[in-house]
Image: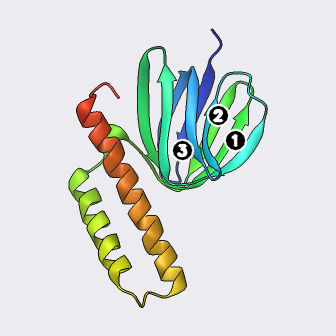
Amino acid sequence: MAKLKLDIVTAERSVFSEEVDVVVAPGIEGEMAILPHHAPLMTALQAGELKAKIGTEEYSLVVSGGFLEVRPDRVVVLADSAERAEEIDIARAIEAKKRAEASMADKYVPGMLAAETEASLRRAMVRLKVAEKRRKHPQV
């Protein structure tokens, strides 16, 4: 079966680099699945869970924005931030969620700050979701 080379990188490091069967990514217009020989495309990513499947194993990562480029045999993710499920610091994610919720409770948050706070809350919630999924299914 044909494979895709998946590279996920941030400004700081290479987070994931493997041959995979399928990639499911959080595009800005919704979740998208990419198989080998997919038509070339480039899209922005939103904060969310990125999944890579190799055989029967599924790997979960959290990406927070960035871009995804698809070529017939390769997917490159240039993420603002990315971490594997096993790298997520649950206590830190819970604190980030609490801070964002407290900020959002303030009725007088200026527009840009409100958008940043909402994005922070989304990132924290995705990180917690992926961490919880890993706790229930350690192979993820």
Q: Circle 2 — which element?
A: strand
Looking at numbered disc 2 in the image, what kind of residue is underneath it? Val
Q: Quick one: label 2, few (<14), some, or many (20+) residues within 10 Å? A: many
Q: Quick one: label 1, few (<14), some, or many (20+) residues within 10 Å? A: some
3D distance between C-alphas at marks 3 and 1: 12 Å
Q: Position of residue 63 (x, y in %)?
A: 48, 49
Q: Residue furthest bottom?
A: 108
Q: Which mark is residue 137?
A: none
- Dot 2 or dot 3, earlier in sequence: 3
Looking at numbered disc 3 in the image, what kind of residue is underneath it? Val
Q: Which residue is mark 2?
A: 75
3D distance between C-alphas at marks 2 and 3: 11 Å
Residue at figure coordinates x 26%, y 68% from the top left = 98
The quadrant in which the N terminus is found is top right
Residue at figure coordinates x 57%, y 31% from the top left = 23
The one of 74 and 108 positioned closer to us in this rendering: 108
Q: Position of residue 25 (x, y in %)?
A: 56, 40
- Dot 3 or dot 1, earlier in sequence: 3
Q: Quick one: label 3, few (<14), some, or many (20+) residues within 10 Å? A: many
Q: Which residue is mark 1?
A: 69
Q: Which mark is residue 9?
A: 3
Residue at figure coordinates x 26%, y 28% from the top left = 138
